[in-house]
Amino acid sequence: MAEARVARAQIVGRQPGAVGRDGAERRLQHRVVLEEDLRALSDSAVPPDWLCLDCAGIADIDFTAAETLRRMRPEAARFVVSSVSPKVCAQLVRYQLLAHPDADIYPTPGAVLEAYEAQEGNGSTPAAQ
């Protein structure tokens, strides 16, 4: 049963919307990958309860990436982030992508999985660590 719970706590970590030195072409590639990942999650027979964006490699969230996240993330999934820098955190808050910023930011993807499993065990929504 633990495998099913972990499988539903999807982790997306392919740097969507990252702004690098490669310019617009690189941002477009990341947006396309983000759209593909989110479409696959939304179309899944078992949609995720939580969607975590691992921000470890993300230096910036541009407007297009923010709109892609807003438009395509699975509606029923709780959207959380991990390994987020202060700059990216401020952008996520400014774009109003986090429903509860104090509770939706985790230090690592592992902390997200622990919180998800704890919530599954007691039926509540945990606060971030």
Image: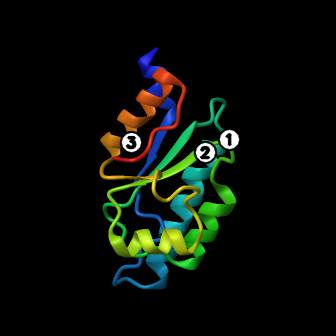
Which dot, 1 or 3, sits closer to the camera? Answer: 3
Disc 1 to disc 2, C-alpha distance: 5 Å
| Foreground pick, 63 / 124 | 124
Residue at screen point 43% across, 44% down = 127
| Marks 1,2: beta carbons within 8 A | yes
Disc 1 to disc 3, C-alpha distance: 23 Å
Residue 43 circle label:
1
Secondary element under disc 3, as helix, strand or loop, is: helix
Q: Amino acid at mark 1?
A: Asp
Secondary element under disc 2, as helix, strand or loop, is: helix
Circle 1 Cα neighbour tier, 10 Å, few/some/many (<14 / 14–19 / ≥20): few
Residue 112 circle label:
3
| Marks 3,2: beta carbons within 8 A | no
Find disc 2 in the rendering and name its residue.
Answer: 40
4 versus 75 height, above or below = above
- Badge 3 or badge 2: first in the primary sequence: 2
| Foreground pick, 33 / 55 | 55
